Image (cartoon, rainbow, N blue to C red):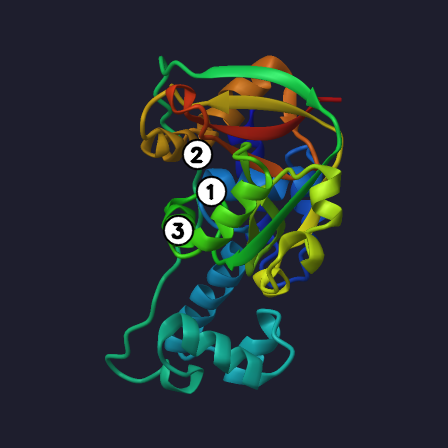
């Protein structure tokens, strides 16, 4: 079964059970996939999470029912999975801009979130440089920000760019500690509410152990930088990279947008799927004549 067909079967399952408790494992099973893998692929291909889709569809249908006058507010709250009328009213107002009790009013504008029909038009013929490597366990040191939305769309590009241009001091400090080695961006803790985005460097053990030793650093501000160590497990990665250029950032964002093609064409053709490990972007900045950006996608053979 190809990914588009599998995803559509999962979406159809969601639609058939919108007024019930929906288990992500059951949704993923419709695509013959693990819940972890399915959630990541769904977000990449659709631009929003499963939870966002379910929530928006339920609130859209609830609005239509209330506007038609065929249901009470308390009954709509229970029907669409809310524990109380208050929690339903809060979610409803955030989505529609009006309270549920106002939905029946003449001329009240409500929002509609349509059922998802997956129809992808993918353009082939794009040349991508890649390699497959097994990477040993790494300890990275860095700082994070919590991003909203999914890790794969335009929203991430905006937040990532803002993150980089407003935290240069921390970047300079880590780059110096790592002797200008590659910078790593790590995505972790992905939920329906967002995810953590880390900027990191791989420090040598000695530097890592003495990072907060004032007798070594000669400064007293390191504790305030909010740094933490992140363990990246031993993983096999498919590594895609931009061409070598003076400013490869535009190609990097284009590479991020190419995930749809990688997931729906390249991975099935090669017999891979995403593995349960962090995804990384690696900025190879030095020497300047070899600058490029890479995305590391954790992969495993399809069982």
SS assignment at label 3: helix
Residue 86 seen in the current view: yes
The front one of 38 and 163 is 163
Q: Note whether 112 is above or below 181 in the view shown.
A: below
Which residue appears at 67% of the width and 54% of the height? Answer: 228
SS assignment at label 2: helix
Q: Position of residue 196 (x, y in %)?
A: 58, 54
Which residue appears at 41% of the width and 80% of the height? Answer: 69
Q: Position of residue 78 (x, y in %)?
A: 61, 76
Q: Residue furthest left?
A: 107
Q: Note whether 88 is above or below 16 in the view shown.
A: below
Asked if labels 1 and 3 touch by Cβ distance under 8 angstroms, the answer is no
C-alpha separation, residue under disc 3 versus residue under disc 2: 12 Å
Q: Residues within 10 Å of mark 2 (few under 14, many from 20)?
A: many
Splitting the image into 4 quarters, where does residue 139 fall? top right
Q: Quadrant of the N terminus?
A: top right
Q: How many marks?
A: 3
Q: Quadrant of the C terminus?
A: top right
Residue 10 seen in the current view: no
Q: Which mark is residue 58?
A: none
C-alpha separation, residue under disc 1 versus residue under disc 2: 7 Å
Residue named by callout 1:
152
Residue named by callout 2:
256
Q: Position of residue 293 (x, y in %)?
A: 45, 29
Q: Position of residue 17 (x, y in %)?
A: 62, 55
Splitting the image into 4 quarters, where does residue 288 fall? top left
Q: Residues within 10 Å of mark 3 (few under 14, many from 20)?
A: some
Q: Residues within 10 Å of mark 1 (few under 14, many from 20)?
A: many
Asked if labels 2 and 1 touch by Cβ distance under 8 angstroms, the answer is yes
């Amino acid at each position: 079964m190809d990914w588009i067909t599998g995803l559509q079967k999962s979406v159809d399952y969601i639609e058939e059970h919108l007024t019930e408790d929906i288990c992500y494992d059951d949704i993923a099973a419709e695509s013959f996939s693990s819940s972890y893998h399915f959630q990541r692929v769904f977000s990449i291909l659709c631009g929003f999470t499963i939870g966002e889709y379910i929530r928006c569809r339920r609130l859209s249908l609830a609005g239509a029912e209330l506007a038609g006058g065929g249901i009470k507010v308390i009954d709509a709250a229970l029907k669409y999975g809310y524990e109380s009328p208050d929690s339903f009213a809060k979610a409803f107002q955030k989505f529609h801009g009006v309270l549920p009790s106002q939905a029946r009013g003449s001329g009240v504008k409500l929002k509609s979130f349509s059922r998802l029909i997956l129809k992808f038009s993918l353009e082939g013929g794009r040349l991508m440089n890649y390699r497959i490597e097994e990477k040993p366990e790494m300890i990275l040191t860095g700082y994070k920000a919590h991003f909203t939305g999914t890790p794969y769309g335009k929203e991430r590009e905006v937040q990532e760019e803002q993150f980089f241009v407003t935290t240069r001091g921390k970047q300079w400090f880590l780059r110096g500690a790592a002797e200008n080695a590659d910078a790593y961006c790590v995505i972790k803790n992905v939920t329906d509410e967002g995810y953590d985005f880390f900027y990191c460097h791989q420090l040598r053990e000695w530097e890592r152990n003495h990072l907060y030793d004032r007798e070594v650093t000669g400064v007293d501000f390191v504790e305030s930088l909010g740094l933490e160590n992140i363990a990246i497990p031993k993983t096999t990665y498919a590594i895609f990279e931009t061409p070598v250029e003076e400013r490869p950032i535009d190609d990097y964002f284009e590479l991020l947008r190419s995930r749809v093609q990688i997931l729906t064409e390249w991975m099935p053709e090669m017999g891979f799927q995403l593995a349960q490990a962090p995804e990384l972007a690696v900025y190879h900045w030095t020497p300047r004549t070899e600058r490029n950006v890479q995305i590391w996608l954790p992969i495993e053979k399809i069982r």
